[in-house]
Each structure stands twice: as structure tokens, then as C-alpha cells.
């Protein structure tokens, strides 16, 4: 797999995932089906952040990696 996620994208995904997880465990705002969907989405965000690859970016040709310089 070729990496297609830059560091800013990865950090943002991790922060969003941690926020969702924190809201779930510290408040009663999330429950039921919505909680399950958001927790699965958080897990996917964390997984894709660690491997620096998002399969949904492929069909759209999105690449948030910084361009490589040939110095």
C-alpha cells in the first residue's frame, strides 16, 4: 500500500477519534446505535492513521502527503 495520508491528516483523525471516545466514556450523550457507529468510526480513524493509508482516498485520487523534494 502506498501512503496517501499526510501528518496533519493523521493527527486530525487521531484527535477526532480520541474526542469521540472521551465523550462516550465521560458523558451520557452517546448511546445505542449512534455510539456503536461512532466508536467503530473512531477505530477506523485510528487504524488508518497508524498505517497512513485511507482506502476511501483511492477512488477520488486524494493524497494529503507532502510532495517529495529532489534536492
Image: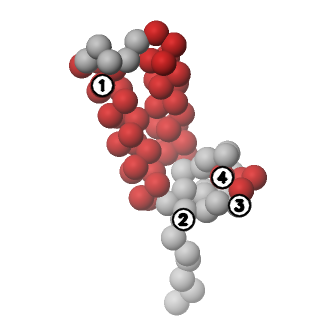
For the residues marked 1 and 2, what is the alpha-carbon distance in whole angstroms? 30 Å
Q: Is residue 66 left or right of residue 22?
A: right
**If you read the primary sequence from the N terminus, does the residue marked by circle 1 or circle 3 appear first?**
1
| Viewer-closest of 47 and 37 | 37
Left or right: residue 5 versus residue 8 is right
User: Percent from the top left, x then y, of residue 5?
Assistant: 54, 56
Foreground: disc 3 or disc 2: 3
Which is nearer the N-term, disc 4 or disc 2? 4
Q: Residue furthest left?
A: 26
Residues at discs 1 and 3 in contact (Cβ within 8 Å): no
The mark closer to the camera, 4 or 1, is 1
Name the residue located 71 percent from the left edge and 60 percent from the top edge: 61
Q: Is residue 10 left or right of residue 63?
A: left
- Whole-angstrom CA distance, mark 4 to mark 1, is 27 Å
- Residue at the far front in the pictured view: 29
Q: 60 or 48, which is in the foreground?
A: 60
The residue that label 3 is drawn on is 61
Q: Which residue matches tag 4? A: 57
First-in-chain label (1 vs 2): 1
Task: Indicate which disc, 4 or 1, sits on the residue closer to the N terminus.
Answer: 1
Instruction: Name the mark on residue 64.
Output: none
Residue 64, image x, y percentages: 55, 62
- Is mark 4 in CB contact (under 8 Å) with mark 3? yes
Label 1 Cα neighbours within 10 Å, binned few <14 / some 14-19 / many ≥20: some
User: Residue 7 placed where, x, y %?
Assistant: 44, 58
At a point 34% along the width and 34% down the height, the residue shown is: 18
Q: Which mark is residue 23?
A: 1
Mark 3 and mark 2: Cα distance apart in space = 12 Å
Q: Residue at x 46, y 9 (%)?
A: 32
In-front residue for pair 21/47: 21
Determine crowd level at label 3: few under 14, some 14-19, many 20+ residues with C-alpha closer than 10 A. Answer: few
Badge 1 marks a residue whose secondary structure is: helix
Amino acid at each position: 500500500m502506498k501512503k496517501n495520508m499526510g501528518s496533519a491528516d493523521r493527527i486530525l483523525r487521531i484527535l477526532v477519534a480520541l474526542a469521540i471516545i472521551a465523550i462516550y466514556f465521560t458523558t451520557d450523550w452517546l448511546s445505542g446505535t449512534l455510539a456503536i457507529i461512532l466508536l467503530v468510526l473512531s477505530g477506523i480513524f485510528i487504524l488508518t492513521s497508524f498505517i497512513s493509508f485511507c482506502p476511501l482516498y483511492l477512488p477520488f485520487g486524494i493524497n494529503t502527503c507532502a510532495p517529495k523534494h529532489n534536492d
